[in-house]
Amino acid sequence: MKISIIGGAGTLGAAIAFRLCQNDQVDELCLIDVNESLLMNHLMDLKTAYPAKTIYKGNFQDLTGSQLILITAGVPNRNDIESRNIFLRGNIPMFQSFGTHIKKYASDAFIITVSNPVDALNYYLYRNFDFKKGQLLGYTVNDSLRFEQAIRSVMEISEDAHLFSPVIGEHGSTQVPLFSQTRLNGNPLALKAEDEVAIKEKLNRWFIEFNRLNINRTTGWATAAGIGRLIDGIVTNGEVDTIGSAIVEGEYGIVDISIGVPVTVSKVGVISIHEWQLAKAELADYQHSAETIKQLIKPFIR
Ligand SMILES: NC(=O)c1ccc[n+]([C@@H]2O[C@H](COP(=O)([O-])OP(=O)(O)OC[C@H]3O[C@@H](n4cnc5c(N)ncnc54)[C@H](O)[C@@H]3O)[C@@H](O)[C@H]2O)c1
């Protein structure tokens, strides 16, 4: 499988490349980045670690033949922010260029946007280029991983127990943790109202505390681990159930936006979107989240 990473020299791009080098079925990795020296630094390092891997610095023409394109490029991260949405204005011109080049050189590839704000940027690709909706996914799994962490911490659940804890909605402050769908070892997890409040509080504080460290670095390891597991699953099992930002057309009463939703993906992209029975309050929060994304991207859509 050939995978290209646009933004391959960044915190995320390089961490994902390192993780993908460990998957033998990913036999070709093309890394693209405007910071060519940093990219060469990573490449020389990675080639020493994985000499048998076909991994190289590419330009947009080298997207040709990619089955999967990961977009991790973006304006430099900042920690003095309350929302990832402030990156949108700077990232839109880049996505205009990426969309144009992907359309030209790898028009059928499965495209996973990781750059923020992920829902808005995924939707921008959909609206401005003639990609099929199933070709486009935004990566949002970290929210579910943090929800899991918060539940385990507040409820003192050990790592041996299996916990399913999906988060849907915006990859941002209006995300919706789905208590109604949470399962502990396959069974519904009954939580008191005060536990839910404590879990939500812990979840919401994560981004604030991460930024308070005052280091302009994003979550390279968690994201690389999440993307790595997704790609391992696709190449090994063919299909993977996950959560990601996908183009919805009526699911949950929401139309024409990209938003975090339960999906099944394969190597060609999103093959189905699942409609779960949500609690009434969760559905209302979800629709509010969709409205927030709509308002954010509206000024950038023709
Ligand atoms: N979806 C998620 O869960 C998630 C998690 C973490 C970070 N992010 C987002 O991912 C993005 C990347 O984060 P990062 O920490 O790797 O940032 P980073 O600054 O380390 O890397 C971004 C890279 O993009 C490159 N770049 C900039 N303009 C480019 C262009 N026109 N063409 C090619 N490359 C270009 C830069 O040179 C840099 O190497 C950010 O938008 C961040 O907010 C998303």
Image (cartoon, rainbow, N blue to C red):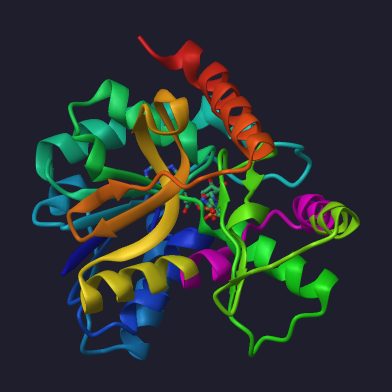
- Kindly identify the residue that appears in the image at 45 percent across and 26 percent down: 253
- Kindly identify the residue that appears in the image at 36 percent across and 52 percent down: 263
- Kindly identify the residue that appears in the image at 27 percent across and 48 percent down: 272
Q: Which residue, as the protein is rendered here, is positioned at the far right?
A: 194
Camera-side residue of 283 and 118: 283
Q: Does the magenta stretch include residue 220?
A: yes
- Span of residues in magenta: 200-225
Residue 243: x and y, percent? Answer: 45, 54
Residue 8 vertical placement versus 173 (above, below) = below
Camera-side residue of 293 and 96: 293
Helix, strand or loop for the magenta stretch, by majority: helix
Residue 18: x and y, percent? Answer: 41, 76
Q: Is residue 65 magenta?
A: no
Residue 32 seen in render: no
Camera-side residue of 264 and 222: 264
Residue 65 seen in render: yes
Q: Is residue 186 left or right of residue 152?
A: left
Residue 199 vertical placement versus 71 (above, below) = below
Quarter location, residue 48: bottom left
Camera-side residue of 81 and 208: 208
- Split into 4 quadrants, where in the image is the C terminus? top left
Residue 74: x and y, percent? Answer: 49, 43
Residue 143 vertical placement versus 84 (above, below) = below
Q: Is residue 251 left or right of residue 141?
A: left
Q: In this view, does 149 lie to the left or right of 1?
A: right
Q: Is residue 272 left or right of residue 113?
A: left
Residue 166: x and y, percent? Answer: 56, 57
